[in-house]
Amino acid sequence: MSVADYMQQLGAQAKAASAVLATAPTVAKNNALLAMASALNSARSALLAANEKDLAAGRDNGLDNAMLDRLRVTDEGIDAMMLGLRQVAELADPVGEISEMSFRPSGIQLGKMRVPLGVVGIIYESRPNVTVDAASLCIKSGNAAILRGGSEATHSNQAIAQCVKQGLLAAELPAASVQVIETTDRAAVGELITLTEFVDVIVPRGGKGLIKRVSAEARIPVIKHLDGNCHVYIDDQADATKAINIVINAKTRRYGVCNAMESLLIAESRAEELLPQLAQGLQEFDIELRLCPRAMVQVGSYQGTIVAATEDDWYAEYLAAVLSVKVVADMEAAIEHINVYGSHHTDAMVSENYTKAREFIARVDSSSVMINASTAFADGFEYGLGAEIGISTDKIHARGPVGLQGLTSQKYVVFGDGHTRV
């Protein structure tokens, strides 16, 4: 079978499954998620063995440490997948929810009902846990899913797919509700993003190259998850202890994630005081600092690697133990820098002046804006979504972490009692 015919088959099966899922009772969807969690637990050894095949191939192919970190599945990771499934099962089902009911002058009653999008195509790289997150959110929101993971995670994703299938069958839902594309042929992506007859929305998760390709070639609406060039700005009225703790956490909690801080901005009035302390804290983690000229002078006796920052550094998502640092005049300069160089993902300000904090929130054009908190909180789990399909940097249809509501739409519903229009 050709790739084109294979993808047509998946699309037709997903479309048929979506019609069943759209009206599936909440208990059936929840049972599927709980059965998937049990299947993952039972298949723990097989999952770890499959992942080791991917890791070995990744090392042979020269994947860097950040990519290998994203690819790795551990016992703790399996526990987290199971927990995520159970949490999504506990969330309120958005499908069928009717809101904004009101009577119109004509006497009809008007409202909005939340409905599934239909068939969601998700293209992602490296992280096998995305297979579980995507499956759980699509099933709970009544959508069928076609998943295309990266070739570097093919063994892991197929092993997880078997657990997903077991859960669906246990709950008597169509096995085609979630299909993980089996071929590693890159042509499958081109076919998926043009399956207008069957697929309703595409969600790409990966590097800029993937996002650009999908955005340029897709004939289906796209919810984009672009890079995470996240900033922390330390204001002239910041609490020093809060600032240091937030910076250390935002940068070092994990490097290969989109909510990690990549750029630190600091008000010039606090640079001489705080930069040496910040550098000392980052030195313990062997962070390479890429500094503007003023930061270079004020960073103190840093024992790690120091490099003069270039223009490209202000745009960079490193996903590594690298941090760019810039001294700015004030909040105005920080906001301007973030809106020019940032990726509109997540940006934070450390300040005790809440008037300025409110202005920062209003003017920074990002999907999440934080005050006195680490950018690491930009996450579906932390936002109470249970899991996320990605973090959208679009402004429509969804923005920020995309959970159950982001995978639904609304339609108008009208109730009358024999009403006719004059």
Image (spheres, rainbow, N blue to C red):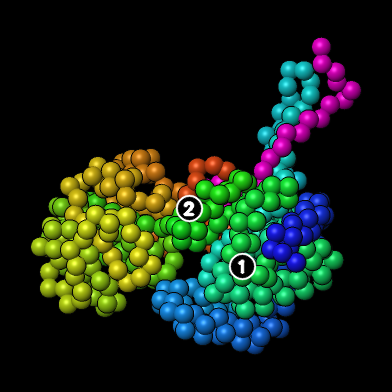
At label 1, counting other C-alpha atoms closer than 10 Å, the crowd grade (few under 14, some 14-19, many 20 or more) is few
Start and end of the magenta stretch?
A: 398-422
Tell me which corner region of the image, top left, top right, bottom left or bottom right, holds residue 404: bottom right
Q: Which residue is mark 1?
A: 185
Q: Which residue is mark 2?
A: 212
Above or below, 58 against 309 in this view is below
The percent position of residue 339, horizontal first and vertical second, equals 33, 45
Query: Which quadrant of the figure contains the N terminus?
Result: bottom right
Query: Is 258 in the magenta?
Result: no
The percent position of residue 133, horizontal first and vertical second, equals 62, 65
The percent position of residue 324, horizontal first and vertical second, equals 26, 62
Tell me which corner region of the image, top left, top right, bottom left or bottom right, holds residue 364: top left
Left or right? Give the position of 365 relative to 57: left
The residue depicted at 72 percent of the width and 64 percent of the height is 2
Query: Mark 2 or 1 closer to N-term?
Result: 1
- Do callouts 2 and 1 mark residues in contact (Cβ within 8 Å)? no
The residue depicted at 73 percent of the width and 33 percent of the height is 412
Q: Can residue 366 be seen here?
A: yes
Amino acid type, label 2: Lys
> How many marks overall?
2
The residue depicted at 41 percent of the width and 76 percent of the height is 64
Query: Of residues 58 and 71, which is closer to you in this image?
Result: 58
The percent position of residue 221, horizontal first and vertical second, equals 60, 45
